[in-house]
Image (cartoon, helix red, strand yellow):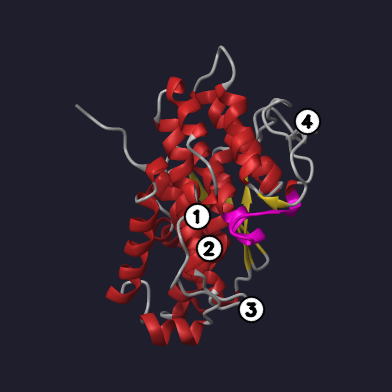
C-alpha cells in the first residue's frame, strides 16, 4: 500500500518538477504527512528546496481532483535529502575585509567578482565559487549546506553583509544573490528564475504576498551570474569597473506590484497563464535586458 502510494506520488512529481530536476531526483518515501524526495546532488537539492512549497501544493491540488486519493490532500511538507560525497558540509570560512556593515550590497558584489578576477588562474570555476560565497554570505547560509561547498577564505569578505541591502531592502538582496548562486550551481538561468517565480506565486497565499519586485531581483541575479560566467575572464575587470551603482545591476521597480494576496492576485491577473501576468513578466525581462552589463557580447 505504502509502496503504491510512493509510486503514485512519484508519477505526479515528475509532471510538476522541471524536467532537468525531475530526472535527477525522485520520491523515495512517505514519512507521516511528509513526502521525502531524494536528490542526486547538492545543486539539485538546492533548487528543489526552493521549489518544495510549490511542488507540495501541486501534489495536493492533483489529489483534490480525485476522491480516490483524497488522503494526499493531508500532505504537509516535502523533505529533500541528498548525500554529499565529501561528508557533512563544512561551514564556509570567510575573511573579514573592510566592507561596510550597512548600506548597499554593491561592495560585496564587487568584492566577490574582484576576488575571482584578480588572480593569475582566474577562470569560470573561480567565479562560480565566488558566486557561491556571495549567496552564503549575503543570501542564505542553508545554500552552502544544500550544495556541499566550502569557498576559499579570500573569495568574499562577509563581515556585516547580513545588514546590507539592495534597493534599500533585505529581501531583494537575498533574492538577487541566491538566484545568482543557483545559476552558478545549475548553470541554467531558467531554473534559477523559475525558483523565484514559483516562490512568489506561493507567497501570494502568505502574509507577505506575491511580489513582482522580488521576481525582478531574481531575474537580475540570474543575469548578473550569467554575464560574468558567460564572459571571458579577461573581460571581467572592465565589466567590474562599469558597475558604478545599483542601477547597473538591478532594474527600476516602478509600477511593479507587490504584497498581493491570493485573492487580489487572482482578481488582477487571473493566474500565471494569463496575458496580463505574461505582460508583467515580459516587462521585467525587458528592464533587466536593457541594463548594459547584461547585454549579450557583440558579435562580428
Q: Which residue is mark 1?
A: 218
Mark 4 nearby-residue class (10 Å; few <14, some 14–19, many ≥20): some
Label 2 – label 3 distance at C-alpha: 15 Å
Asked if residue 173 is among those painted magenta in the image, a careful observer would answer yes
In percent of width and height, residue 119 lies at 59, 16
Label 4 – label 3 distance at C-alpha: 36 Å
Circle 4 SS class: loop
Q: Earlier in the sequence, mark 4 or mark 2?
A: 4
Tell me if label 3 and label 1 are in contact, CB under 8 Å: no
**Residue at screen point 74% across, 39% down:** 99
* Residue 96 placement, left or right of 190: right
Q: Would you say residue 178 is visible in this rendering?
A: yes
**Residue at screen point 35% across, 72% down:** 277
Q: Which residue is mark 3?
A: 207
Asked if residue 202 is among those painted magenta in the image, a careful observer would answer no
In percent of width and height, residue 20 lies at 40, 45
The magenta stretch is 162-175
In percent of width and height, residue 278 lies at 31, 68
Nearest the viewer among 82 and 94 is: 94
Circle 2 SS class: helix
Q: Nearer the viewer, mark 2 or mark 3?
A: 2
Q: Earlier in the sequence, mark 3 or mark 1?
A: 3
Mark 1 nearby-residue class (10 Å; few <14, some 14–19, many ≥20): many
Q: Which residue is mark 4?
A: 95
Q: Earlier in the sequence, mark 2 or mark 3?
A: 3
Q: In the figure, 203 relative to 219: above or below? A: below
**Residue at screen point 42% across, 79% down:** 66
Q: Farthest residue toward the top?
A: 120
Label 1 – label 4 distance at C-alpha: 26 Å
Tell me if label 1 and label 2 are in contact, CB under 8 Å: yes
Tell me if label 4 and label 3 are in contact, CB under 8 Å: no
Amino acid at each position: 500500500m505504502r509502496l503504491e502510494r510512493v509510486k503514485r506520488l512519484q508519477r505526479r512529481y515528475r509532471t510538476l518538477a522541471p524536467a532537468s530536476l525531475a530526472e535527477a531526483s525522485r520520491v523515495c518515501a512517505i514519512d507521516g504527512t511528509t513526502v521525502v524526495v531524494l536528490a542526486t546532488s547538492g545543486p539539485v537539492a538546492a533548487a528543489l528546496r526552493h521549489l518544495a512549497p510549490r511542488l507540495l501544493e501541486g501534489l495536493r491540488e492533483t489529489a483534490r481532483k480525485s476522491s480516490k486519493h483524497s488522503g494526499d490532500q493531508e500532505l504537509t511538507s516535502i523533505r529533500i535529502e541528498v548525500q554529499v560525497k565529501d561528508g557533512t558540509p563544512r561551514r564556509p570560512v570567510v575573511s573579514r575585509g573592510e566592507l561596510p556593515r550597512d548600506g548597499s550590497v554593491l561592495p560585496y558584489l564587487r568584492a566577490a567578482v574582484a576576488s575571482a578576477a584578480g588572480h593569475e588562474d582566474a577562470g569560470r570555476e573561480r567565479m562560480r565559487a565566488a558566486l557561491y560565497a556571495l549567496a552564503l554570505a549575503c543570501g542564505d547560509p542553508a545554500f552552502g549546506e544544500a550544495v556541499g561547498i566550502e569557498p576559499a577564505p579570500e573569495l568574499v569578505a562577509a563581515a556585516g553583509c547580513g545588514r546590507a541591502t539592495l534597493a534599500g531592502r533585505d529581501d531583494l538582496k537575498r533574492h538577487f544573490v541566491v538566484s545568482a548562486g543557483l545559476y552558478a550551481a545549475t548553470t541554467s538561468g531558467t531554473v534559477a528564475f523559475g525558483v523565484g517565480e514559483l516562490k512568489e506565486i506561493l507567497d501570494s497565499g502568505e502574509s507577505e504576498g506575491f511580489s513582482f519586485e522580488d521576481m525582478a531581483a531574481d531575474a537580475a541575479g540570474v543575469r548578473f551570474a550569467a554575464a560574468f560566467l558567460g564572459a571571458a575572464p579577461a573581460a571581467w575587470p572592465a565589466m567590474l569597473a562599469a558597475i558604478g551603482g545599483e542601477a547597473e545591476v538591478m532594474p527600476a521597480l516602478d509600477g511593479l506590484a507587490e504584497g498581493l494576496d491570493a485573492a487580489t492576485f487572482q482578481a488582477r491577473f487571473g493566474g500565471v497563464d494569463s496575458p496580463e501576468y505574461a505582460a508583467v513578466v515580459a516587462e521585467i525581462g525587458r528592464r533587466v535586458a536593457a541594463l548594459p552589463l547584461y547585454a549579450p557580447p557583440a558579435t562580428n
